[in-house]
């Protein structure tokens, strides 16, 4: 069997095991927490008999192991069940809101990675601005993203009023749904007004999420870059008379990026989780917002569904990151 | 040479960075909704003489007449109104999920209830124009109003009413348990629906104008199914759905609405779950109306030019639930001392900043079993005496644990911190434990409550069944007694049977006058026996643009139909 095929099969198997583990954790974690979902579902005046019927309807009267088994079987057929709270199918509910979260995370990645790399290179190459960037990055890391979100929303939406406080697009603007990503769909529709409006709406939430990521990348890349710039082959390049731009951006950066790729992969997972609070603050209608309420109301099926989607995305992302390693650094091989 | 190149690169990087920053800043500003207009508006606002336009509504009493006629005389002025909405809107299926009263508001804009309700909480004719009890009050004839149209133009009929009721009582719909009391639904004439009840339920009339009691068109529901109906609903309410996508519900007025066309042409419910962001929404002018914001934001916005802030007392009463399956709280002296030691006026004034009203029973003003002449005084000396009689003092305090929420209701945790401090002054050493609402329900159901639980009891119906009744009746699945019975615990108060006898008439008495009199007696009884400590009535904080003419409702819902600009 070719090494690449073997590697891919191995990774797929690992991903399946990881997903199974994630399913077990997302299922049991919530059910062992105190809190009765059925009591939250019913209004006053109900009888004990009705409560028992409702428990049976949602299989809550079954042993946990059986409940897990049934849920797993449903999961294999992509049936995430019905939301305890809303009574609607969980899968379409998540799919409807997932693009909003993914769009937010992708734009955050673009901002975080691009600013992180540019400032990281600047800090490594020009040491005189390093201390300034270090101070800025300390603030970036020390202040959590939800606080950045509040600062940004107050400053830019309430005081300066240059950005909208919440939502994905201005009211009244309609874009035909193709991908669910408003920035992409507005381009596909050739609607500049909708694109600008979408961009305006996504900037503050994504910046508040990107600040921490940017500073982390910046500090990591700076260290990595300084190490690489002191390597013999860089010295040889300089002796050969290559321009500094070529040396920094072509020869050094590619090798210095390895830890950045690792961080970006890890940060992606954090962004998926971290977006929950930011979505709430910016009224961003993604699955984070949905998760927030689902947790409050012990909506087991919805929480499990969202957590499984998170898990799937994170696991696939890590897989992609591993593939990227081999592209960036030929020394890394499939094994 | 290398140094020179470095500097060049550095300058390039700086240049790119600076240019990006400028593009970002200026671009963002220019992309902003007409930057110049914003500057002008800000300058105008700064120059304007600030006039505080805070309105405070302190009672739930109001004229009992239906506002229908008022709406018909108001000249329709096309306008769009954006409401920064504190709750998620996931489905518009009116029967699916259990919710608090304000969450109903978008549904109430789209659908009509069987009965409507006045500001005084009295049930009024709605889709059902009259109703009549049968013999023994185990059947009810509902006469359906003629001439009502659904948004698709089809007439609302008795069949639709019967179908809606039948759907509501089918599990797993949220309030199927409530409607389960209806054993048979029959259309007995062109416009009459007969309900047969399995037992007398005095609150059934109130429920016909409450929570999920909305009428849906049978033909649409059956054609598309409940899930699709929840996405593209058809009602007979004052507004029909223009578009519904995640986070945004856009409504447009229904021109054939039977009560008269709404004044506001378009209404948008915009999902903004964070209270600070909602405050920013109205402050920045991107939303016209919001509610349930932080008290500090409310006070700040009430002084903002162009905004009107209204603190509306609503039908939510904060109470301390006291289970009697602990020896400490089984002692009536301890329970009453806990009540005497709480300075409620101080809590409302200093912690809630006046946004609330002290109550002395579970029944707030406007409720049918409200007792205007009854009060339970703040008397720390009396509390100390009662504790001494129970064998406790400041040097030998009674030790209890109290469960509270944190952030579910305005300043809930801070209120309980103050209560704990007040108790400490008389010899009650309480430890606060923060729980979630889900935990509260589970603890209540399984007999694992702490010595006292902070809880907010809502009763927009005004009927005592839904306040003192279900909160205190030992046969109710919502009282502290439920857990005691479920876990077979000891009732150290020895009051369960007596409480059952006192509260039974609230549910069983068929003479309405006698039932309300019994409910008043019960409301007094549970307080005098220390089975509950009523604290205060909550206020709902609304902020709106000052050109909006609207008085918030004591039920807590937001009804755009009654708004004009």
Image: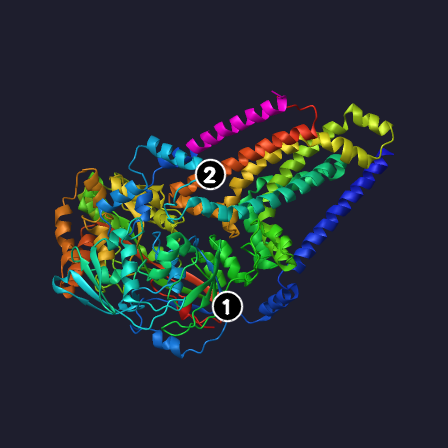
Residue B80 image label: 1
Count of numbered labels shown in the rendering:
2
Q: For marks 2 and 1, give the CA distance.
A: 38 Å
> Counting other residues with Cα less than 10 Å from the Cα at mark 2, is it few (<14), some (14-19), or many (20 or more)?
many
Find out whether residue A14 is within the magenta segment.
Answer: yes
Residue A307 image label: 2
- Choose between B546 and A47: the one closer to the eye: A47
- Choose between B141 and A263: the one closer to the eye: B141
Span of residues in magenta: A1-24
Relative vertical location of residue B415 with respect to residue B130 in this rendering, above or below: above
Say whether mark 1 and mark 2 are on the same chain.
no
Find out whether residue B39 is within the magenta segment.
Answer: no
Q: Position of residue A283 (x, y in %)?
A: 51, 53
Q: Position of residue A1 (x, y in %)?
A: 60, 20
Q: Position of residue A60 (x, y in %)?
A: 31, 38
Relative vertical location of residue A152 with respect to residue A267 in this rendering, above or below: below
Please report the residue visible at 43 percent of the width from the left and 54 percent of the height from the top: B87
| Chief secondary structure of the magenta portion | helix
> Counting other residues with Cα less than 10 Å from the Cα at mark 1, is it few (<14), some (14-19), or many (20 or more)?
some
Mark 2 lies on a secondary structure that is helix
């Amino acid at each position: 069997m070719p090494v690449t095929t073997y590697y891919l099969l191995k990774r797929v198997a690992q991903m399946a095991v990881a997903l199974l583990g994630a399913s077990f954790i997302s299922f049991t974690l919530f059910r062992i927490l105190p809190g009765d979902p059925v009591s939250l579902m019913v209004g006053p005046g109900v009888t004990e008999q009705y409560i028992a019927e409702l428990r049976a309807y949602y299989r809550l009267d079954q042993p946990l192991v059986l409940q897990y088994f049934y849920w797993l079987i449903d999961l294999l057929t992509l049936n995430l069940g019905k939301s305890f709270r809303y009574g609607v199918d969980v899968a379409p509910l998540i799919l409807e809101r997932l693009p909003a979260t993914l769009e937010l995370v992708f734009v955050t990645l673009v901002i975080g990675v691009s600013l992180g790399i540019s400032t990281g290179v600047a800090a490594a190459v020009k040491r005189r601005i390093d201390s300034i960037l270090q101070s800025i990055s300390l603030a970036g890391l020390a202040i959590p993203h939800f606080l950045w979100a509040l600062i940004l929303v107050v400053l830019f939406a309430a005081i300066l009023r240059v950005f909208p406080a919440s939502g994905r697009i201005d009211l009244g603007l309609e874009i035909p749904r193709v991908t669910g990503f408003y920035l992409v769909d507005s381009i596909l529709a050739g609607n500049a007004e909708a694109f600008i409006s979408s961009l305006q709406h996504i900037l503050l939430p994504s910046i508040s999420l990107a600040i921490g990521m940017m500073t982390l990348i910046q500090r990591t890349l700076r260290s990595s870059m300084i190490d690489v710039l002191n390597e013999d082959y860089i010295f040889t390049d300089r002796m050969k008379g290559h321009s500094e731009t070529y040396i920094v951006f072509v020869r050094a950066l590619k090798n210095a990026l390895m830890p950045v790729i690792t961080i970006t992969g890890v940060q992606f997972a954090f962004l998926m989780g971290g977006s929950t609070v930011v979505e709430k603050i910016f009224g961003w209608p993604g699955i984070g917002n949905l998760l927030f309420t689902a947790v409050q109301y012990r909506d087991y099926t919805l929480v499990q569904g969202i957590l499984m989607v998170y898990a799937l995305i994170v696991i696939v992302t890590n897989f992609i990151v591993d593939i990227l390693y081999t592209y960036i650094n030929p020394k890394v091989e499939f094994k | 040479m290398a140094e020179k190149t470095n500097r060049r690169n550095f300058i390039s990087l700086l240049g790119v960075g600076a240019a990006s920053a400028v593009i970002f800043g200026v671009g963002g500003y220019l992309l902003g909704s007409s930057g110049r207009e914003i500057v002008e508006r800000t300058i105008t606002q700064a120059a304007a003489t600030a006039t505080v336009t805070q309105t405070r509504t302190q009672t739930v009493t109001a004229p009992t007449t239906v506002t229908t006629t008022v709406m018909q005389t108001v000249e329709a002025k096309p306008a769009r109104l954006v409401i920064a909405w504190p709750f998620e809107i996931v489905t518009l299926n009116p029967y699916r999920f259990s919710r608090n009263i304000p969450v109903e508001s978008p549904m109430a804009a789209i659908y009509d209830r069987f009965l409507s309700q006045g500001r005084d909480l009295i049930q009024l004719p709605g889709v059902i124009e009259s109703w009549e009890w049968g013999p023994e009050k185990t059947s009810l004839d509902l006469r359906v109003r003629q001439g009502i149209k659904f948004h698709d133009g089809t007439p609302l009929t008795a069949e639709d009413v019967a179908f809606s009721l039948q759907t509501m009582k089918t599990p797993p719909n949220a309030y199927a348990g409530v409607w389960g009391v209806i054993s048979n639904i029959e259309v007995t004439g062109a416009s009459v629906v007969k309900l047969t009840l399995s037992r007398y339920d005095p609150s059934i009339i109130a429920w016909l104008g409450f929570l999920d009691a909305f009428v849906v068109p049978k033909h649409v529901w059956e054609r598309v199914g409940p899930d699709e109906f929840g996405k593209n609903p058809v009602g007979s309410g004052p507004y029909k759905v223009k578009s519904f996508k995640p986070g945004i519900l856009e409504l447009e007025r229904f021109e054939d609405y039977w009560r008269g066309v709404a004044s506001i042409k378009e209404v948008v419910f915009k999902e903004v779950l964070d209270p600070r962001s909602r405050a920013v929404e109205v402050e920045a002018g991107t939303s016209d109306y919001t509610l349930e914001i932080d008290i500090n934001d409310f006070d700040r916005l009430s002084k903002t030019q162009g905004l009107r802030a209204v603190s509306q007392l609503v039908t939510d009463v904060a109470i301390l639930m006291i289970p009697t399956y602990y020896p400490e709280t089984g002692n009536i002296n301890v329970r009453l001392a806990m009540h005497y030691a709480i300075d409620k006026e101080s809590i409302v004034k200093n912690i809630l900043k006046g946004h609330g009203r002290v109550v002395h029973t579970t029944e707030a003003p406007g409720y049918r079993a409200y007792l205007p002449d009854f009060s339970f005084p703040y008397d720390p000396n009396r509390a100390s005496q009662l504790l001494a009689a129970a064998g406790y003092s400041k040097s030998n305090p009674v030790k209890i644990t109290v469960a509270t929420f944190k952030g579910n209701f305005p300043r809930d945790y801070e209120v309980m911190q103050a209560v704990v401090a007040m108790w400490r002054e008389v010899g009650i050493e309480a430890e606060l434990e923060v729980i979630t609402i889900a935990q509260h329900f589970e603890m209540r159901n399984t007999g694992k409550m702490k010595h006292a639980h902070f809880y907010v009891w809502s009763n927009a119906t005004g009927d005592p069944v839904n306040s003192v009744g279900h909160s205190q009746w030992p046969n109710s699945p919502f009282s502290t007694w439920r857990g005691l019975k479920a876990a077979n615990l000891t009732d150290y108060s020895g009051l369960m049977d007596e409480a059952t006898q006192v509260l039974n008439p609230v549910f069983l008495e068929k003479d309405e006058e006698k039932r309300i009199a019994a409910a008043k007696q019960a409301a007094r009884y549970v307080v005098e026996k220390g089975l509950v400590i009523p604290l205060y009535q909550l206020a709902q904080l609304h902020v709106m643009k000052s050109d909006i003419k609207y008085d918030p409702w004591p039920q807590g819902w937001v009804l755009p139909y009654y708004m004009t600009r």
